Amino acid sequence: MTLQNLYCPECGTEHEAGADEPWRCPTDGHALDLQTPPLPDGNPLPISQLDTRRGIWTFHEFIPVDQHVTLGEGFTPLVDAPHWGAEFKLEYVSPTGSFKDRGATTTLSRAATLGVEKIIEDSSGNAGSAIATYAARAGIEADIYVPADVKQSKLMAIQRSGARPVRVEGSREDVTKAAIDAVENGEGWYASHAWNPAFYAGTMTFAIELAAQRDWTAPDAVVTPVGHGTLLLGAYRGFDVLERAGIIDSMPRLLGAQAAGYSPIADTFHGEHEAEDDHPNDIADGIQIREPARKDQLVDAIEATGGDCIALGENIVENTLDTLHRRGFYVEPTCAVAPAALTKYREMGVVDEDEDVVVPLTGSGLTTL
């Protein structure tokens, strides 16, 4: 595949690919994207005829990045969840324990293609672990900027991969600022899961893989947790490609779930303080993002599919986490936000009892030990 340049979807300016390529548009500051993903011709093979040993790279025709780094991520199980009247896609069985591996494999593959020698990422946990692990696989040096109070299990996952964790005091936004300062000082290539468009080339495979597991059909709705929204926006792009290629008839509604106190997308749809309690939801620490890098794109994706986004307080998330564990799904607290939101959406009348719904379980409980 020809190496794709970056472009700004806001002003249309194209930027040449390279190890020194910009991490955001120099003209207007917006997040950049890769050129439009390819649209495969013809009908896709049934999953029984696909060689799934390549993981997400089974769908290389859809991915605007060449494969260089992989740990076999993808083809996570899709299982019935009768208690919720839905199907759960078990993203937490990925190599480093979260869906972030989908974006890490494509981001580090692009970095390897560009000849990048060192990457920088900022993350509260799962993305940092994934980027650090795939950087180790690629033989690329990595600095991972993390909050000073990062969970010890996630800090150790970064350190043991050979990456250098850089602990930053202050808010999650302070961590991002410190990482960006390092990038702009020429200390490394920004492998940000929020800003780097190659990451979304990986998370879009969630939708493609899900459709393949369902005999190339889409559900009525998909409910995802939203911090920076890398999974929701990736899913939107994947379903959009499938629809434009004529593989699915229509896109599912995308329904987001945020933590109260960290809910800029939900606030756009419902105003502030729509959650049942006003204090910040500190249980769902993986999505404590007040300034998503691609907020406008997330809102547009939700609106384009007739979706919604709500914020949830701690009580419903904690209760849902307990229920998940008792029913055999050993996930981290942030992961419980999406199934909790499904319950809330049904109470609100947004989702009918008989609708076909898929919920990704995004992170393993092992990462919180």
Image: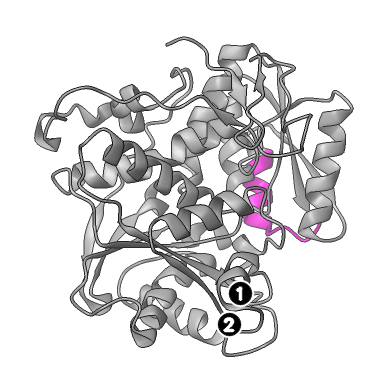
Q: Main secondary structure of the magenta part?
A: helix
Q: How crowded is mark 2: few (under 14 residues within 10 Å), some or many (20 or more)?
A: many
* Mark 2: amino acid: Glu
Marks 2 and 1: in contact by CB < 8 Å?
Answer: yes
User: Mark 1 or 2 closer to N-term?
Assistant: 1
152 in the magenta segment: yes
**Left or right placement of residue 216 versus residue 238 in this view:** left
Residue located at (21% from left, 36% from top): 246
Q: Is residue 28 magenta?
A: no
Give the crowd class for mark 1: few <14, some 14-19, many >=20 residues within 10 Å: some
Q: Which of 369 and 20 is in front in this view?
A: 20
Residue 252 x/y as whole percent:
30, 57
Q: Position of residue 105 (x, y in %)?
A: 49, 30
Circle 2 — which element? Answer: helix
Q: Name which residue lies at 54% across and 36% down.
A: 199
Residue 143 picture location, percent across and down: 75, 34
Residue 346: image x %, image y %? 33, 82
Q: Which quadrant holds the N terminus?
A: top left
Residue 162 versus residue 282 in the image, above or below: above
| Horizontal side of residue 143 vs 360, given as left or right | right
Quarter the C terminus occupies: bottom right
Q: Of 240 and 12, which appears nearest the observer?
A: 12
Q: In this view, does 283 lie above or below 26?
A: below
State whether residue 246 appears in this view.
yes
Q: What residue type is labelled 1?
A: Ile
Q: In this view, does 314 lie to the left or right of 203?
A: right
Residue 321, above or below 96: below
Residue that mark 2 sits on: 314
- The span from disc 1 to disc 2 (Cα, nearest Å) is 6 Å
Q: What stretch is highlighted in magenta?
A: 148-159
